[in-house]
Image: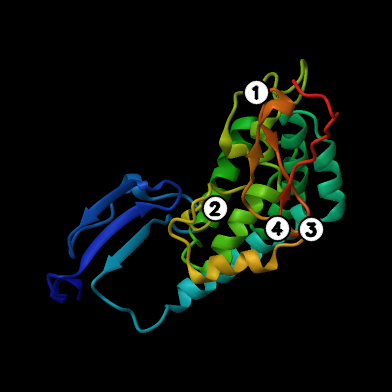
Amino acid sequence: GLSEIGSDVAFTAQSVQLEKRNEARLGASDSIPANLLCSVGEGRPMMARLCVSGFSFGRRSERLVAHLHAVGRLSGALVEAYHAPEYQRRLAECKDRGEVTELIRAAQAQILPQHGFPLSGDDEFSEAARKLSQMQAFLMSGKCEPRIAEHLDWTMHLSGYVKMAGLPPPKEGGYYKSRPASQGVLAVAMPTATTTPQGRGATEESASASDRWAGTHRPPNVVWIAGTWCKYEPRQMQWDGSCFVETVEFTGRRT
């Protein structure tokens, strides 16, 4: 049993959603604290992430393999939906955060019911937020698989979630006017350490994603630029298939 493992083995339990922001060191015979357990969907067991150091497992259990396969199917379906040319065309036309939210929710309504998350347009806001929080935890529980971690980073960018930071709030009478703001209503995962702009914590698997960046499948990071030509108002640079670019027109006059 675990009580017979050597003293150099360490256990850390984490919330699958908050990770290092909500964790606890455990002994070999300790139970995982209830506040670290997350619901990952109706009919599924509560989950937490248990990090073990000083010990190597020979293989993955069949339950873990099956779970990661299910998470991978959902994360891949979301990337495919967000990457679709029609979705990207509509995203480019969004003028405020409410329009992006509506676009994301429409894609969710198409995908999530097929993967055990029966989201309905008739759901009350609180019920929709609860279901999507479960879905987010379900996705985050698969981050130990590099392919899934990469999918989650793509959803941040392709869905338009990152773009919202540079857009104005919903206009008067818009989608969110009578609703409280909540990250739980978006089917995207929080950024992972594998794709920070500084590259901290990058793995070989996640680093290989840059080799597949193309004009229609953009990097999961966003680059902003500011200068005298835009009165130092930050502008989001565009991915042209090989690098981020910003077009600047020179008039020939010096100021």
- Residue 128 placement (x, y as % from top left): 63, 38
Residue type, label 3 = Gly
Residue highlighted by disc 4: 79
Between residues 241 and 131, which one lies in front from this camera angle? 241
Residue highlighted by disc 1: 179
| SS for dot 4 | helix
Q: Counting residues from the N terminus, which is met first, the one under dot 1 or under dot 4?
A: 4
Q: CA–CA distance between discs 4 and 2? A: 20 Å
- Circle 3 packing at 10 Å, graded few (<14), some (14-19), many (20+), is few
Residue highlighted by disc 3: 215
Point out the frontmost of discs 2 and 3.
3
Q: Counting residues from the N terminus, which is met first, the one under dot 4 or under dot 3?
A: 4
Q: Counting residues from the N terminus, which is met first, the one under dot 2 or under dot 1?
A: 2
Q: CA–CA distance between discs 1 and 3? A: 36 Å
Q: CA–CA distance between discs 2 and 1? A: 24 Å
> Which residue lies at the image location 19% right of the left edge and 69% below the top edge?
9
> Which residue lies at the image location 51% right of the left edge and 51% below the top edge?
196
Between residues 141 and 127, which one lies in front from this camera angle? 141
Q: Counting residues from the N terminus, which is met first, the one under dot 4 or under dot 2?
A: 2
Say which mark, if any, is on residue 41. 2
> Which residue lies at the image location 64% right of the left edge and 39% below the top edge?
224
| SS for dot 1 | loop
- Circle 4 packing at 10 Å, graded few (<14), some (14-19), many (20+), is many
Q: Is residue 120 visible?
A: no
- Residue 163 placement (x, y as % from top left): 69, 38
- Residue 135 placement (x, y as % from top left): 58, 50
Residue type, label 4 = Val
| SS for dot 2 | loop
Q: Are marks 2 and 1 in contact (CB under 8 Å)?
A: no
Q: Counting residues from the N terminus, which is met first, the one under dot 1 or under dot 3?
A: 1
Vertical arrangement, residue 150 with respect to residue 23, above or below: below
